[in-house]
Amino acid sequence: MIAALAGTVRHKEPNSLVIDVSGVGYKVLVPTEVALDATLSQPILLWTHLAVRETSLDLFGFLEKEKLSIFELLITISGIGPKTALGILNVASPATLRQAVASSDTSYLTRVSGIGKKNAEKIVLELKDKLKVSKDDVTVDTRGEGDALEALISLGYSERDSRDALKKVSKDVVGASDRVKYALKVLSQNA
């Protein structure tokens, strides 16, 4: 198994990178945020998971070991494949996912493409004891976060820009309307 790759970014697409490791290019499927932040011809280290199927070998990579661990927990759930697990990590930080599971908030998980109510309930049920919730995670309001995200998208901001702005809002700011106000300030500074 390939546990990690350290090399140079040779090519990037919205959901993948080609990493040159001693002259061999490995295509690695990554969260969109990683692909967008990667710089061509720059070194990178990715923690990886090799998904072996009858017809393909897919390599999934993450900058943080924690995201890889959560990815590997997600794919142990029946009905959740590697690409769906990657989709979940595209929209939810590990802290947000832990809080959604701890509070049995399936509404946040159903916002992920390909996750219906039944799969969201299955994720919550199967990960309830496996994910450890820290004090910092308890402050995350997944319903308010989801409502704030929807509000920003309805105002015409992209999902990526909206998520990035919400990540920059202090955890002390609670409630969807207050989080939207602060996120709008962040977005106006970036414009």
Image (spheres, grey):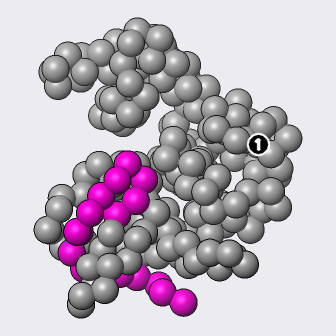
Q: Which residues are magenta?
A: 1-17
Residue 24 placement: quadrant: bottom left
Position of residue 17 in the picture relative to residue 58 (left or right)? left
* Residue behind mark 1: 120
Residue 41 in the magenta stretch? The answer is no
Viewer-side residue, 4 vs 83? 83
* Residue 65 image position (x, y, % from top left): 44, 71
The residue located at (24%, 58%) in the rendering is: 38
* Residue 89 image position (x, y, % from top left): 53, 51
The residue located at (34%, 12%) in the rendering is: 181
The residue located at (34%, 63%) in the rendering is: 17
Position of residue 176 in the picture relative to residue 164 (left or right)? right
Viewer-side residue, 95 vs 83? 83
* Secondary structure under the numbered disc 1 in the rendered image: helix
* Residue 169 image position (x, y, % from top left): 33, 29
Is residue 66 visible to the viewer in this orientation of the structure? no
**From the viewer's perspective, is residue 153 above or below residue 125?**
above
The residue sitting at the front extreme is: 55
**From the viewer's perspective, is residue 33 above or below residue 172?**
below
Pick the quarter of the image with the C terminus: top left
Q: Main secondary structure of the magenta part?
A: strand
Pick the quarter of the image with the N terminus: bottom right
* Residue 64 image position (x, y, % from top left): 39, 66
The residue located at (55%, 72%) in the rendering is: 58
Residue type at numbered disc 1: Ala
Is residue 84 visible to the viewer in this orientation of the structure? yes
